[in-house]
Amino acid sequence: MPAPHKHAHLRTPPGVILGILGVSAAASALICWLVYYHAPTDVAGTQLRSLPLVNAVLNGLATVALLTGFEEIRKRRVLQHRAAMSFAFIFSSIFLVSYLVNFTLHGETHFNRFNPWWPFYWKLLASHIVLSTVALPMILITFFLSLTGRFHAHKRLARWTFPIWLYVSVTGVIVYLMQAACH
């Protein structure tokens, strides 16, 4: 039986969890405000028109990094796993900033409701939105646990975080492709 890790007995300070949940809630509230209340500043789409494509590429890169990280940890290559997951975190963080900029400038992208793909698109987008809201605090807490050496807790949470994060990244690309095909 392996010896327990030296940080296994440590509990995550409630203030850290509350801080992560607060940042996550603020990010979600900002996105809701941008979607429902903020008037886009560039309705004509003359500035940074390629941001949706950039966002899809960032989601694709995050997907590759997530799958690489998963494979590396299965091979017990911890340093390579850490590097891959750090890249996934970086790509997803840049995505979030770019996504917020895109919404600020251009507002919401509308999908043609008369398109035969509409029922599938709506369900996919709804699941993507709900799970992205759930994923953000999970990703931050999972990273915190890793960075503080709480690998047992990190592993327990990562089993849930990984598939949700992967789903959000993959569906982000699919949503972009569906929107691009309809415009």
Image: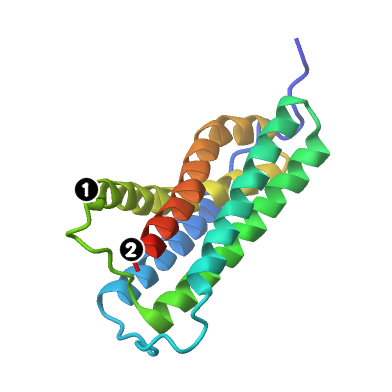
Viewer-closest of 82 and 98 = 98
For label 2, the SS is loop
At x 34%, y 87%, the residue is 43
Label 1 is placed on what type of residue? Pro
Residue 176 visible, this orientation: yes
* Front-lying residue, 29 or 110: 110
Local packing at callout 2 (Cα closer than 10 Å; few below 14, some 14-19, many 20+) is: few
- Asked whether disc 2 touches disc 1, contact meaning CB atoms under 8 Å apart, the reply is no
Q: Amino acid at mark 2?
A: Cys
Residue 143 placement (x, y as % from top left): 63, 48
Going 35% across and 77% down the picture, which residue do you hit? 107
Look at mark 1 in the image and give the residue it sits on. Answer: 119
Distance between mark 2 and mark 1 Cα atoms: 14 Å
Coloration mode? rainbow
Up-down relation of residue 75 to residue 126 (above or below): above
Of badges 2 and 1, nearer the viewer stands: 2
Residue at (39%, 81%) from the top-left corner? 106
Q: Position of residue 157 (x, y in %)?
A: 54, 35
Q: Is residue 74 above or below residue 86?
A: above
Percent position of residue 50, x then y: 52, 75
Q: Which mark sits nearer the N-terminus, 2 or 1?
A: 1
Provide residue 183's location: percent of width, then percent of height. 35, 69
In the image, residue 48 above or below residue 20? below
Residue density around tag 1, few if under 14, some if 14–19, many if 20 or more, within 10 Å = few
Q: Which residue is painted at 43% across and 66% down in the image? A: 27
Q: Does 25 sit left or right of 90 as displayed?
A: left
Q: Is residue 17 left or right of residue 150?
A: left
Furthest residue in direction left, as rendered? 114
Number of marks in picture: 2
Q: Which residue is mark 2?
A: 182
